[in-house]
Image (cartoon, rainbow, N blue to C red):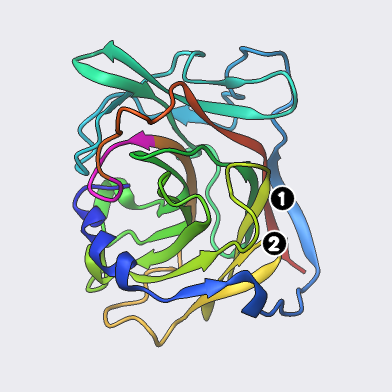
Amino acid sequence: MTATRRRLALLLLAAPIVACGSVVTGPAPDWTLVWSDEFDGPAGQRPNPANWVFDIGTGWGNRQLEFDTDRPENVSLDGEGNLAITARRESYGGSAYTSGRIKTQGLFEQAYGRFEARIRLPTGQGIWPAFWMLGSNFATVGWPECGEIDVMEYRGQEPTIVHATAHGPGYSAGGGLTSRYLLTGDRFDTGFHEFAIEWTDERIVWFVDGQRYHAVDRDDPPGPWVFDHPFFILLNVAVGGNFVGPPSGSTPFPQSMLVDWVRVYRAG
């Protein structure tokens, strides 16, 4: 959800959809858990500051309409073992909506491994949640040179489809290497689902509920492979923007993305 990259919307709309019945789950190596947040704690408590920092403000470059805050009204535990990132229709900081955007930058960053989260997604026109990653050198080299991995992106008006994309120099924004996953017979807003990548020095593979549906190999990008250094994790719910358009009068608010857990593993 970095500046300019949301021009990828045109490509995403044309990308092939992989139905859940047609994917194949590959063999997994032994994994060692190295970092996690289970989001246990009382309702209203902010996420663990040892794990997460807040991005506060607006104008992220994607024509999003929300002001992201560090208030518990927008980002807090729900008391039932989940993190709730909640978008609200309210006037705040010059914006008509509020929401939240948190990241592990400066606290936890890792190259390679399995990164996964169990999430229940919101719904509605103009709602744009994501579980994604940026290269730890973002502050020095900028985007897309730092690299970006979208583990899961979702348009609230398409409750049966999620998107997976890799971005780098020469394959960013509308040129991102992307695919879509269709959940047949169910919706992503009616229950929790697991979104994951397995990342090595040779490829990145995406999964939904353990089913593989997208992969990018080192030789695939038309530009340099920028996935050989640590990345940090981001979770957010945007309102409006190039990818989803503005909310409609029927979009429900408040609207929450619930995150049961985030876990990171190393192979071996």
Residue placed farthest to the bottom in the image?
A: 219
N-term mark: 2 or 1: 1
Where does residue 240 sit, x and y in percent of width and height? 28, 37
**Nearer to the camera, 140 or 237:** 237
Q: Which residues are magenta?
A: 238-244
Position above or below: 68 against 109: above
> Of the residues shown, which amino acid type is indicated by label 2?
Arg
Under circle 2, the secondary element is strand
Which residue is at 52% across, 66% downward? 181
| Residue at mark 2 | 266
Where does residue 54 sit, x and y in percent of width and height? 43, 27
Residue 225 falls left or right of residue 197: left
User: Looking at the magenta stretch, what is its main secondary structure?
Assistant: loop
| Residue at mark 1 | 34
Residue 110 falls left or right of residue 33: left
**Nearer to the camera, 67 or 13:** 13
Which residue is at 27% across, 12% downward? 92
> Of the residues shown, which amino acid type is indicated by label 1?
Val
Q: Residues within 10 Å of mark 1 (few under 14, many from 20)?
A: few
